[in-house]
Image (cartoon, rainbow, N blue to C red):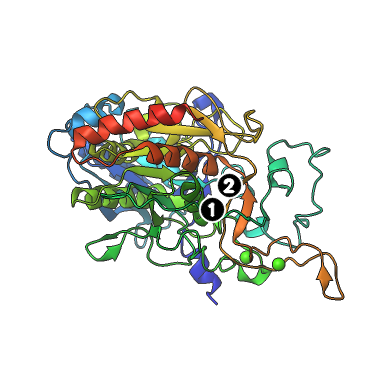
Amino acid sequence: MASWQDAYRTLSWRVSPAEPDAGRYPTAYVPDALLVPQVPGAEDELAALRSLAEARGWVLEADGVVEFTPPPRGAPSMQDLTRAGLPRGAGPSGVTRLRVARAPGTPADTPDAHVLLRALREQRGKGVVGLDHVLAIGPVTSTNPVTSTNPVTSTNPVTSTNPVTSTNPVTSTNPVTSYLVPGAGGKQPVAVLAPPPPRPSGRGRPVTVAVLDTGCAPHPWLDGVVTRPDLDGSPIGLLGGIDAEREPDDGTPLDGLAEPAAGHGTFIAGLVRQLAPGADVLAIRVCQGDGLVDEFTLVGTLADLVAHQHRGHPVDVVNLSLSYTHESDDDQVYSEGLYAVLQLLRAQGTTVVASAGNAGTSRPHYPAAFATRTAKHVAPLVSVGARNPNGTVAAFSNDGPWVTAHVVGASLVSTHPRVNTAYEPLVRSGGRETIDPDDYGSGFACWSGTSFAAPIVAARVAAHLKPTRTRAERIKGAAAALRAARRQF
Ligand SMILES: [Ca+2]
Ligand SMILES: [Ca+2]
């Protein structure tokens, strides 16, 4: 069993205070990290940041660099790929993460990246330095750090009710959390009788869909379909920590219950399997069972995927069922590193599909909201909201002009790791029992979220794609595949 230190070594986060009058809103961020896109002029901003840190008894230490593979031959330059969002009209060649630490021997407050960044923006106005935002993968659960309460208590069986008998969806007052209730879209085991869709034995390379998520469990529908890509002999994505698809209860093992995002990646892989049976799924672990990943880790993983593709391994579609919100009205300029790496993928011919999030808000969530930026000569970026099974828009789905597609995302059925955690049947008597609410021995579940709407778009695009070789063909083919897929939404 992993210790609690192992579980919490992964990612600590803080939520910034809301100051609507000052144009600032809550966001979840890594408390002691800042991201600096490598662009001309960033040095000035960095020098100002260092003196602001010094005045508070803090120092800035370099803590990791992501270098981008430059745009492929014939593609627009990095500057052209990103300039719409950048104040200085240049594209980043990478992203540096800085740690804010206490200066040795100096009495000082606990470092807070948001405090420092606010001071910087007050002094210099719009810049390029940003928070290391925390993204939440989004089934309708409590994993969104901005809207949820403390994750330490949210899954506690002592304080949460039994999922079978918890709030009645008819009488409950919160339309978003009604989707947590089994029978109303909430997660529950189901039995599937249909056989797995047959894999077409086509010639040529298969279409590939990369899923950056919790990973993927072994499963009869997925074995031989799902692989994890390597870069220079090392798997892309998270290496350490706890694999939530294999050990669903390991983050908070004493409660006996699965982590909120356990099963998420396997469920997504199964949706792709259902709609694009010929596609290969690249399952890339970026988070553990808490469903949280920091922006720097995500940018680094996407940059590895760009490099992987640059070395001759095509990635046709990338599915991102994760999102965060910005702290500022000037938001888009502060995610230039993430935008740039997505643009690099799109310039290679990869379609990017991102979920809109489940907070029932019109506040833009990223990376989905990048869909509103005009981008020429690249493959599409689609942001996806969720519909109910009857076609109406789901109450939990975020929405707004930045959501560019809606497909069903509530009460879907897909593959789930075959695990059983601590809830018990209500009645067990004489060899008979009621349904065990968290026994997924059948290998299938019903679940809801824009997380699951996004892979439906990803899979439908993949199903219409014809694998092509050149960059220009791939970009043209991606746009045509999306047009064909839209007719099925
Ligand atoms: Ca647990
Ligand atoms: Ca159980």
User: Mark 1–mark 2 contact, CB under 8 Å?
Assistant: yes
Percent x, y for residue 30? 44, 50
The quadrant of the rendered image in which ligand 2 is seen is bottom right
Spatial separation of the CA atoms under disc 1 and disc 2: 10 Å
Is residue 3 depicted above or below 312 in this figure?
below
Does the image show residue 324?
no
Q: Specify the amino acid type for callout 1.
A: Phe
Residue visible at 40% across and 67% down in the picture: 240
Q: Is residue 391 left or right of residue 319?
A: right
Q: Is residue 352 left or right of residue 79?
A: right
Q: Which dot marks residue 267?
A: 1
Residue on which disc 2 sits = 139
Quadrant of the frame with the N terminus: bottom right
Q: Secondary structure at mark 1?
A: helix
Residue, far right: 429
Q: Specify the amino acid type for callout 2.
A: Pro
Percent x, y for residue 400? 53, 24
Residue visible at 49% across and 63% down in the picture: 217
